[in-house]
Image (cartoon, helix red, strand yellow):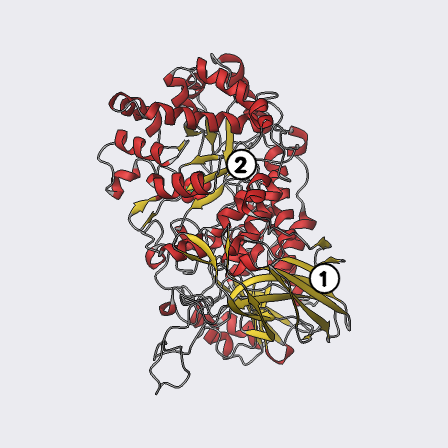
């Protein structure tokens, strides 16, 4: 087996049976006496000495500041509340020294000395701002995602933080939803791989019970459980009315993968699922997550979500809302103080809540113990490391690997060295947007824009008529278009995701100059660009790439690196097509190009996306040999040789899709079940071998993972729309034990 891609050894295999899987998870049921011995005795003793008020205090997470004013609310009154044991955690706080002082008050000046948990949204960088998560997912390289998570964990740890509200693992198939930027796109399998990679990077390898994380590792939080990406109309916070099968086959798998990777906490989502708000969803949080899956980690509500149960219309008072959330299995209340102010009232009305409070506090105290905070409350934070230089090299490499070449007609790219370049569009000079919407302690001045990275280009922000004049005097035009950072993220849903503002007019003006145009897309969502990109020969999708955006894009433009990114979510032609996914069922009348045939399509537009899921071009060309398939009793081994027929070294992302052509229910026309990013020199050939467990083609039926006997079609290629080789294997009837898409395929490159 050789190193591939980023020099990462492929071969993670995760197809152990559920019991083995769960035991491997740090948050499995307390499986051995050792677990109990390490923490149980201490926690039971502590619990026995806590008053009800102190227990409820542990369930209370308060904002110690605001995102843009961290620590700003840690005034004398707040510190007195810490001394009285009225809170268990703070968010929106940071800094090795200020947090050490705050922890010292909790440990040395409160009655029981229980340490606090300090949390922040470190989504794609703490000080070194990296590409946004959707961009990192476009790298189709879990090792790269893990490196990004490990870097941000180390920087957050140095700042005294214990806990980050990451990874966001919500599958999203409607990019009108602004939070698509925070996840890994439309596919359950890809999202599962990216979820587990982030958890490994943040928490480190799954730890034996009793073993605290290594320095530089923090507690992760898999969010938002569950179905948040399925909100109606792509409207943030709206209802998610999904079928049970879609919930289990599409939205739950990445959470199961994150749990098995050892994610120490989960966050419930704002939305309801089929009318039951997730913050009060006893069936999915209590029944599925804690019951069937056996999850023992901490569950925190999302911001203010507990009192919002009143808005949902399922609670009449804050006390009722508190009781509903507690019964569902929500251990900690983020920012609303509803537990703090109303849970005691709820208890007087219903004493059966007391054991539930004890369970919640036990999980909170166990989380603190597993972080080693009872042994050494000051083990997080390093003021010297906090001042270390930015990791620009890593930021640039991750950014370069996230860029997707969507179109390159006439080989406009890479640019010719002597070309006179016009660089047009305000986004090319927008340092703030390069950082995306969740930027923790990232600073705008850290970002190197494309304009700074291309000093030889003539720049115009897109003014009329200067832009056309600048274009006319150049050999090639680089046109930076898309959205700024504030158009995606939380509460940034849009009803029309065509090119915003006056950018279409800018394109038309620049196009009139008659020079070859390279469109450089920037933004946090796939836009609907069929009209905008008409007659534009070259298109790069560059997302928001962090502090090294400019140099990374320049590396690809000049051909220093061949682009190899792939779309983690397809790009629609028009907004009206949404929601959409490549993994759709065929229907009784599959879409037909002939409009005279009645079929599942629109009559006012072409079929399918503008750019497909998994699409991405290269400066090289790759050839795929016919598949060989080895049938085993419970797996199929699919091998394909890939050759670089191009003239430059480049990565190819080899993708494996499956389809069950005849089953007891309609199955998607394709589902991703494996991929490998392989670096190949010109003329080099490597064989990629996928070992697919039969459990990975199970379907959710009548509350179980059912493997139905029959043939399974296999498709291997460079994208979901560029299948190069096909084959099939057969499976016997059986049962799976975990979500099919959550299981990682063993990928070997030999
Ligand atoms: C926000 C987000 C959540 C985030 C939390 C804390 O509303 O929904 O993703 O982690 O509040 O900032």
Between 183 and 389, the residue placed more toward the observer is 183
Which residue corresponds to the image point at 77% horizontal and 68% vertical from the top-left? 681
Question: Whole-percent x and y of residue 411?
Answer: 64, 77
- Which residue bears the numbered disc 2? 27
- Which residue bears the numbered disc 1? 749
Between 512 and 653, the residue placed more toward the observer is 653
Number of marks present in the image shown:
2
Q: Earlier in the sequence, mark 1 or mark 2?
A: 2
Quadrant position of residue 532: bottom left
Q: Ligand 1, what quadrant?
A: top left
Mark 2 neighbour density, 10 Å: few (under 14) some (14–19) many (20 or more):
many
Residue 713 numbered mark, or none: none
Which residue corresponds to the image point at 62% horizontal and 43% vertical from the top-left? 201
The residues bearing labels 1 and 2 have C-alpha atoms spaced at a distance of: 32 Å
Left or right, residue 421 beside residue 584: right
| Most distant residue in the bottom direction | 596
Quadrant position of residue 32: top right
Question: Whole-percent x and y of residue 86?
Answer: 41, 20
């Amino acid at each position: 087996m050789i190193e591939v891609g980023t020099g990462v050894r492929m071969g993670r295999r995760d197809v152990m049976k559920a019991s083995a899987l769960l035991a491997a998870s740090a948050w499995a049921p307390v499986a051995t006496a050792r677990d109990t011995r390490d923490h149980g005795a201490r926690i039971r003793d502590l619990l026995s000495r806590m008053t009800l008020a102190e227990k409820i205090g542990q369930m209370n997470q308060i904002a110690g500041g605001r995102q843009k004013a961290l620590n700003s609310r840690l005034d004398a009154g707040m510190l007195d509340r810490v001394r009285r044991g009225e809170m268990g955690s703070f968010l929106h706080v940071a800094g090795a020294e200020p947090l050490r002082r705050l922890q010292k008050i909790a440990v040395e000046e409160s009655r029981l000395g229980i340490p606090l948990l300090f949390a922040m949204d470190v989504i794609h960088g703490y000080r070194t701002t990296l590409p946004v998560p959707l961009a990192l997912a476009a790298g189709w390289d879990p090792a790269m995602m893990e490196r990004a998570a490990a870097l941000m964990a180390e920087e957050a740890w140095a700042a005294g933080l214990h806990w980050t509200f990451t990874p966001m693992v919500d599958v999203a198939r409607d990019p009108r939803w602004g939070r698509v930027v925070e996840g890994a796109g439309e596919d359950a399998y890809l999202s599962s791989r990216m979820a587990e990679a982030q958890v490994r990077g943040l928490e480190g390898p799954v730890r034996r019970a009793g073993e605290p994380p290594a320095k530089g590792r923090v507690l992760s939080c898999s969010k938002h459980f569950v179905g948040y990406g399925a909100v109606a109309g792509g409207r943030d916070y709206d209802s998610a009315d999904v079928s049970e099968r879609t919930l289990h086959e599409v939205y739950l798998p990445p959470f199961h993968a994150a749990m098995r990777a050892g994610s120490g906490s989960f966050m419930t989502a704002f939305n309801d699922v089929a009318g039951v708000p997730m913050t009060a969803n006893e069936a999915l949080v209590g029944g599925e997550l804690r019951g069937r899956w056996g999850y023992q980690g901490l569950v925190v509500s999302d911001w203010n979500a507990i009192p919002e149960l009143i808005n949902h219309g399922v609670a009449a008072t804050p006390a009722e809302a508190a009781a509903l959330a507690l019964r569902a299995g929500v251990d900690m209340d983020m920012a609303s103080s509803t537990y703090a102010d109303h849970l005691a009232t709820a208890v007087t009305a219903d004493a059966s809540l007391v054991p539930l409070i004890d369970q919640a506090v036990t999980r909170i105290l166990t989380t603190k113990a597993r972080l080693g905070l009872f042994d050494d409350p000051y083990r997080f934070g390093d003021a010297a490391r906090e001042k270390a230089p930015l990791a620009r090299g890593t930021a640039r490499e991750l950014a370069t690997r996230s860029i997707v070449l969507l179109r390159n007609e006439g080989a406009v790219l890479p640019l010719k060295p002597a070309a006179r370049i016009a660089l047009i569009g305000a986004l090319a000079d927008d340092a703030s947007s390069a950082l995306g919407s969740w930027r923790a302690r990232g600073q705008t001045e850290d970002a190197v824009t494309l304009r700074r990275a291309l000093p030889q280009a003539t720049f115009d922000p897109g003014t009329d008529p200067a832009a056309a004049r600048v274009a006319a005097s150049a050999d090639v035009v680089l046109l930076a278009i898309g959205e700024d950072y504030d158009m995606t993220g939380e509460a940034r849903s849009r009803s029309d995701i065509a090119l915003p503002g006056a950018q279409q007019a800018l394109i038309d003006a620049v196009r009139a100059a008659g020079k070859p145009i390279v469109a450089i897309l920037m933004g946090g969502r796939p836009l609907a660009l069929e009209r905008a990109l008409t007659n534009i020969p070259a298109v790069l999708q560059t997302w928001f790439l962090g502090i090294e955006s400019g140099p990374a894009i320049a590396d690809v433009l000049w051909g220093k690196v061949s682009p190899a990114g792939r779309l983690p979510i397809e790009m629609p032609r028009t907004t009206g097509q949404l929601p959409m996914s490549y993994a759709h069922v065929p229907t009784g009348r599959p879409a037909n190009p002939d409009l005279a045939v009645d079929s599942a399509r629109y009559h006012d537009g072409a079929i399918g996306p503008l750019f497909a899921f998994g699409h991405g071009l290269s400066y090289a060309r790759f050839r795929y040999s016919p598949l060989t398939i080895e049938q085993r009793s419970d797996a199929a081994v699919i091998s394909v040789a890939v050759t670089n027929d191009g003239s430059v070294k480049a990565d190819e992302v080899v993708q494996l899709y499956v389809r069950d052509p005849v089953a007891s229910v309609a199955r998607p026309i394709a589902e991703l079940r494996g991929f490998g990013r392989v670096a190949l020199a010109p003329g080099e050939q490597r064989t990629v071998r996928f070992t697919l467990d039969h459990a990975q083609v199970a379907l959710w039926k009548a509350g179980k993972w059912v493997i139905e006997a029959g043939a399974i079609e296999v498709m291997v290629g460079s994208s979901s729309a560029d299948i190069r080789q096909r084959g099939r294997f057969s499976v016997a009837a059986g049962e799976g034990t975990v979500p099919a898409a959550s299981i990682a395929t063993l990928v070997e490159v030999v």
